[in-house]
Amino acid sequence: MISWKNHFLYQADYQHWASDKLFESLDKLSDEARKRDEGLFFKSVHGTVNHLLVTNLLWWGRLRGEPQDLRPDQQLYEDWRELKQALKQTLRQTQHWLQAQPADFFEGELRYRTTSGKEHTLWVHDILTHIATDCAHQRGQASAAATRLGAPAPEMDYSYYRREMQDSLANARVAANG
């Protein structure tokens, strides 16, 4: 049976991988197209990716005990490259931070304040599940809008990630035993 820690380390790596797949698609669009209001909750593809970054910063700040003073719709980066780089860096730092946590951290509870100031308590594994599913939801919205705008549809399914990782590991083993 896999531990909560290992499960969420896989999830963190998957988030990074899936975001890279999404970026490959979104990079095919012009900056104007990425910023066009497409009727998404955060208006545009750019706004949706920005929200991915903001929510990751909010949740990881809460988990680390360093709450962030951000609004869910706060625009952090106007420049596409800077936005992508910031999200990629945040996802990778998160993965490293999770790796450093003891196994019992994932079974604990977290008391935190929402952006509206309300206090809540949730299990850490429920928060991490929320982060993973929210990221998938937001990437799906950005992907749908991007394909409507003419970008290729990215293959971001978790099963593709796992197969790619298994293939990479098998190739590394063959190369090592060469």
Image (spheres, rainbow, N blue to C red):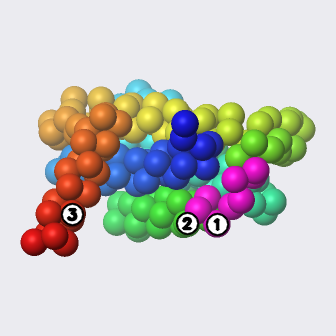
Q: Position of residue 9 (x, y in %)?
A: 52, 52
Q: Residue at x 21, y 65 (%)?
A: 172
Point out the image quarter for the C terminus. Answer: bottom left
Name, please, the residue furthest toward the front.
177
Q: In the image shown, does 146 or 9 lie closer to the viewer? A: 9
| Separation of residues labelled 2 and 3 (CA atoms) | 24 Å
Q: Secondary structure at mark 1?
A: helix
Q: Amino acid at mark 3?
A: Arg
Q: Residue at x 17, y 40 (%)?
A: 151
Q: Amino acid at mark 1?
A: Ala
Q: Residue at x 39, y 31 (%)?
A: 141
User: How many numbered discs?
Assistant: 3
Q: Would you say 74 lies left or right of 12 here?
A: right
Q: Position of residue 74 (x, y in %)?
A: 60, 51
Disc with the residue nearer the chain's start (2 vs 3): 2
Q: Secondary structure at mark 2?
A: helix
Mark 2 vs mark 3, foreground winner is 3
Residue 109 placement: quadrant: top right
- The answer to if 101 sits in the magenta stretch is yes
Q: Position of residue 112 (x, y in %)?
A: 84, 45
Q: Would you say 104 lies left or right of 99 here?
A: right
Disc with the residue nearer the chain's start (3 vs 1): 1
Residue 10 in sight: yes
Residue 46 in sight: no
Labels 2 & 3 near each other (Cβ < 8 A): no
Name, please, the residue furthest toward the left.
178
Point out the image quarter for the N terminus. Answer: top right
Q: Secondary structure at mark 3?
A: helix
Disc 2 crowd, CA 10 A, few/some/many (<14, 14-19, 20+): some
Q: Which residues are magenta?
A: 98-105
Residue identifier under label 3? 173
